[in-house]
Amino acid sequence: MHSFLNLLTLAGLASQASAACSRALLQEATTSYLKAQAAGKPDLLLALSPNASYAENDKPLLITKGVLSQPVTIDFNRTLLDTTECATFTEITAATSKHPYVIHTRMLLAQDSSIITAIESVVTDDGDWVFNATGHLYWNKQEKWDPVPEAKRTARAVLKAAGDAYLDQWGNSSVAVPLGAPCTRLEGGAYTGTAATTTNTCKMGAFPQPLKVANRRYVIDEELGAVDIFNGFPWIERTKPNDSMPSSNLFRVEGG
Ligand SMILES: *[C@@H]1O[C@H](CO)[C@@H](O)[C@H](O)[C@H]1NC(C)=O
Ligand SMILES: *[C@@H]1O[C@H](CO)[C@@H](O)[C@H](O)[C@H]1NC(C)=O
Ligand SMILES: *[C@@H]1O[C@H](CO)[C@@H](O)[C@H](O)[C@H]1NC(C)=O
Ligand SMILES: *[C@@H]1O[C@H](CO)[C@@H](O)[C@H](O)[C@H]1NC(C)=O
Ligand SMILES: *[C@@H]1O[C@H](CO)[C@@H](O)[C@H](O)[C@H]1NC(C)=O
């Protein structure tokens, strides 16, 4: 706990970095992404670079062959805007869609332009680990993720450290994770609490074998107090030591 508080103080002093992309620009890109996914029409995307990369579940794919080329009924969405990295994160819960999905998408934009240079998604559907879009929708939409008032914002480095600690604890139970109260965790469609939870129900601890979560790609939004980490989760593919599951973990931090 003490080292976490120290980190908070240090990061607070260094949080004056200048923004590389405006929220308005990033918001426009994600709005176009949601429209494109709802219609199944990638050409509704705001200014996609002709050489933009596109990948689903860590595999490069033609955009015309991907989920973005299928219409999906969007029941709920959340977006993170990362003005430092010119990156966006969008979560789509599609429970009532003909084909139910939960999709996490990270997009990169060229600096100070609206040109999208990379799109990658973790696309989950029936048969994926604890997948339940109905449960995901039910619990997710009860969570209030309002913008954090400016004076109460958590520094970028602290948000990143909190997300990293959560992933690191899986391989090392000595890692201190700054879990507060209340804390709730949504795994696929399963929730550890209820809307009325006042305690910390997030504690996990380590897996019974050494485990290193690699290939972390971050989208950090200080205004929302949130960070998403795309990562390779090695546990489920443990029979293939060099393989990992495409995975995405989304965190919200309140009050540090
Ligand atoms: C991608 O296309 C843009 C023009 O939209 C160009 O400026 C850039 O050099 C290209 N990048 C690569 C890696 O080809
Ligand atoms: C995404 O969520 C916002 C509310 O946060 C809502 O206003 C918007 O209509 C949603 N977009 C789609 C395509 O469902
Ligand atoms: C999925 O979640 C809903 C809502 O929480 C629940 O009613 C349903 O039983 C769940 N389905 C499965 C297969 O767990
Ligand atoms: C586990 O985490 C603790 C606390 O951060 C650290 O001191 C220790 O070196 C870590 N162990 C390994 C094997 O990484
Ligand atoms: C896994 O990766 C390590 C390090 O890159 C390599 O030495 C080893 O041969 C790989 N094992 C398999 C089964 O591919």
Image (tube, rainbow, N blue to C red):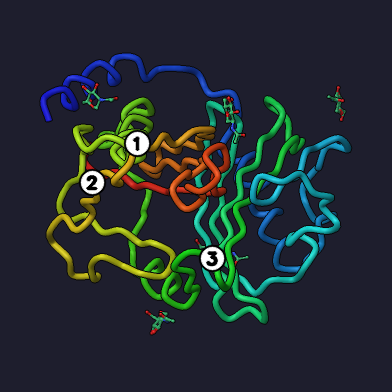
Which of the two residues, 4 or 254, is positioned nearer the viewer here? 4
Residue designated by label 3: 128
Whether residue 216 appears in this view of the structure is yes
Could you give the CA–CA distance between mark 1 and mark 3, rounded to whole angstroms? 23 Å
Q: Which mark is residue 205?
A: 2
The picture places residue 142, in percent across and down from the top left corner, at 34, 69
Q: Which image quarter: residue 130?
A: bottom left
Image spot of residue 192 (x, y percent): 26, 65
Q: Which label's residue is closer to the chain start, 1 or 3?
A: 3
Task: Identify the residue at image location x=81%, y=42%.
Answer: 48
Q: Hey, which quadrant is residue 167 in on the image?
A: top left
Query: Tag 3 or tag 2, which sits nearer the N-term?
Result: 3
Which residue is painted at 19% across and 27% down in the image? Answer: 4
Which sits in the foreground, 74 or 201?
201
- Mark 1 crowd level (few <14, some 14–19, many ≥20, 10 Å Cα): few
Mark positioned earlier in the residue sequence (1 or 2): 2
